Image (tube, helix red, strand yellow):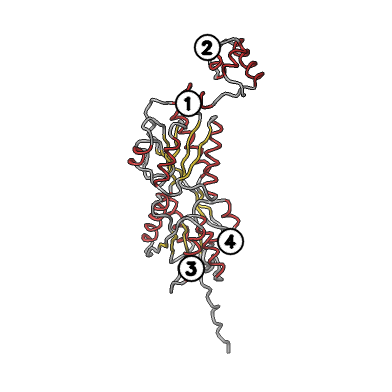
Amino acid sequence: MPATIRDVAKAAGVSVATVSRALNGSDSVVAETRQRVLDAAAALRFVPSNAARSLSLRSTQTIGAMLPDLHGEYFSELIRGIDLAARAKGLHLLLSSSHGDADEAAAALRAMNGRVDGLLLMSPHVDDDFLRGNVPEHLPVVLVNTRLAGRTHPTFRVDNYGGARTMIGHLLATGRKRIAMIGGPASNPEAVARQQGYVEAVQAAGQAPLVLPGDFTEAAGWRAGQELLALDEPPDAVFACNDMSAIGLLGALREAGIEVPREMAVCGFDDILLARYMNPPLTTMRVPVVGLGSLAVEALATHIASAGSPPPALDQLLQVELIQRASTIAVPPPSRPPPERKAHH
């Protein structure tokens, strides 16, 4: 049988409470007694119970992160940022996904209740009613890219609207006259903001918006490519709501023999690692994904440490950066025939 805390107390000649305080680093235990407890625990190969420690300290040293999905490079990088910051703070990470479903999101949060000291939430379903119905009032929460903007919880958002307008400005500057867009899920606030930026930018340039439905996947980008190529007048540029959609579109254009960017420029959003290795390399908006995860965890750790105090009124908007690559090279001006030479008599 594995050793218990009572076995350690008996071997060290102290009470169970003293063993608990010594193992938890309490200053109330003198150095000699602490060392005796540590030696006894080592000799007995005693492993403290995290559950018991959590009950005694009223802390799990664990944070929960609920994301809309765990698939793809974007979420891989976001999780990396969350994990790096959690480890730096000495926190464990409990990870779950809502898979885009409100009931699954609620079930995931209920499963985390009592097992985490705080929550990092990134979900299109998060609003005031959702939080009231599924998150204990006392539990520290940090929100990432939700509809809420720092009213009740610290919030981190990406400038999706501004990034979309910047990208359309870039396409216009390269001479594109008819710019279409592949959208994202209608329930996703990031996709909605990117589409709003696109629509307003093309309208301001005197163009009519053309938005094809999408869901952030490569398959959606490929399907959109088929629809665009079937038009009587295909666009000369396409802004995809994310890089995976843009990659799917590039595949459809390549199959159809369409030259990118000469016949059609293509660009995305996020700057996932794969974007720079496409043929041609993909122009995109760089999102600080790892930094987003790290900043959110740091804010959550601060929120947890100040338990009992109201959360800081924080609403941080992270800027994005235009990364120009070969998929949107400027359209060359139409070539003019050389002037006719007059005959000399």
For badge 3, the amino acid type reads Gln
Under mark 1, the amino acid is Ser
Q: Which residue is mark 2?
A: 28
Which label is found at residue 59?
A: 1
Secondary structure category for the residue under label 1: loop
Question: How far apart, in angstroms, are the residues tagged by discs 4 and 3?
Answer: 19 Å
Closer to viewer: mark 2 or mark 4? 2
261 sits left or right of 122 in the view: right
Q: How many marks?
A: 4
Q: Is residue 316 left or right of residue 42?
A: left
**Upstream in the sequence, badge 1 or badge 2?**
2
In the image, farthest residue toward the front: 1
Separation of marks 1 and 2 at Cα, in angstroms: 19 Å
Residue neighbourhood size for the residue with mark 2, other residues' Cα within 10 Å, grouped as few (<14), some (14–19), many (≥20): few
Q: Compare residues 303 and 19 and report the one nearer the observer.
A: 19
The residue tagged 3 is 226
